[in-house]
Image (cartoon, rainbow, N blue to C red):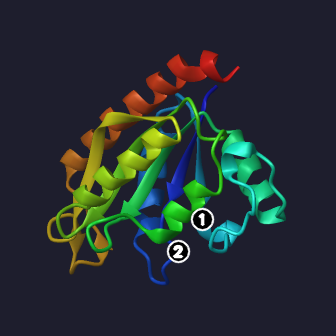
């Protein structure tokens, strides 16, 4: 069975990303088509990129990088959950992606973003970086507006149409992860 990591792409205190990721995870595990796992950037406490050798070389000196590499290597695809900060995604998520290179390659990803305008700009910036590390991002994405999908701009309350969007996105992530598997073997 394929393994999909739902990446909590914020480390900010009081973050909504964890709540959003758990909502996606709860919907995903009901499907039974893959093993869905939460991957919380906070659990890895990655400092600002501190490896002397570029990630493309795969020569990691730091234990936190080795642990991060092992976690990502075991996954076939991802759902990245990110807020939008200043028209982009989080620095913590960019840093986490930059720590690795080959571990990302030839895997699929879906995007769940949130913000005033649904986090659409964060998702578009993230797509550019994912392409560079050879992650195939699926077209379907979920954009959650702080105005319509959260109560008081803080409590997650997505409309039923958002569950449909999650389903379509997960369908694509799963099928693409399976299709890309022969490239990773």
Q: Quadrant of residue 152?
A: bottom left
Q: Residue at x 62, y 71 (%)?
A: 42
> What residue sits 46% from the left and 24% below the top?
176
> Callout 2: few (<14), some (14-19), or many (20+) C-alpha neighbours within 10 Å?
some
Which image quarter is the C terminus in? top right
Using residue 151 as the reference point, say whether residue 47 is left or right of it. Answer: right
| Label 2 secondary element | loop
- Residue tagged by mark 1? 41
Spatial distance from mark 2 to mark 1, Cα to Cα?
A: 7 Å
Q: Earlier in the sequence, mark 2 or mark 1?
A: 2
Residue 155 image point, x, y percent: 31, 75
Quadrant of the rendering where the N terminus is positioned: top right
Give left or right: position of 102 versus 145.
Answer: right
**Callout 1 environment at 10 Å: few (<14), some (14 to 19), or many (20+)?**
some
Q: Are marks 2 and 1 in contact (CB under 8 Å)?
A: yes
Query: Element type at marker 1?
Result: helix
**Residue 61 position in % (x across, y down):** 84, 60
Q: Position of residue 113 (x, y in %)?
A: 32, 57
Frontmost residue, 73 versus 20: 73
Which mark identifies residue 11? Answer: 2
Q: Quadrant of residue 47?
A: bottom right
Q: Is residue 152 above or below residue 116?
A: below
């Amino acid at each position: 069975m394929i393994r999909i990591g739902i990446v909590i792409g914020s480390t900010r205190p009081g973050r909504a990303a964890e709540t959003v990721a758990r909502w996606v995870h709860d919907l995903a595990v009901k499907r039974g088509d893959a093993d869905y796992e939460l991957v919380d950037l906070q659990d890895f406490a990655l400092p600002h990129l501190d490896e002397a050798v570029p990630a493309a070389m795969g020569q990691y000196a730091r234990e936190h990088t080795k642990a991060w590499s092992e976690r990502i290597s075991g996954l076939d695809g991802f759902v990245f959950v990110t807020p939008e900060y200043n028209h982009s995604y989080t620095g913590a998520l960019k840093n986490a992606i930059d720590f690795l290179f080959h571990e990302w390659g030839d895997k699929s990803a879906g995007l769940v973003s949130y913000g005033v305008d649904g986090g659409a700009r964060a998702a578009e910036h993230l797509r550019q970086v994912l392409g560079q590390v050879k992650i195939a991002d699926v077209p379907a994405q979920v954009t959650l507006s702080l105005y319509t999908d959260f109560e008081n701009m803080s409590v997650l309350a997505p409309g039923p149409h958002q569950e449909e969007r999650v389903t379509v996105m997960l369908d694509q992530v799963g099928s693409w992860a399976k299709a890309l598997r022969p490239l990773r073997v």
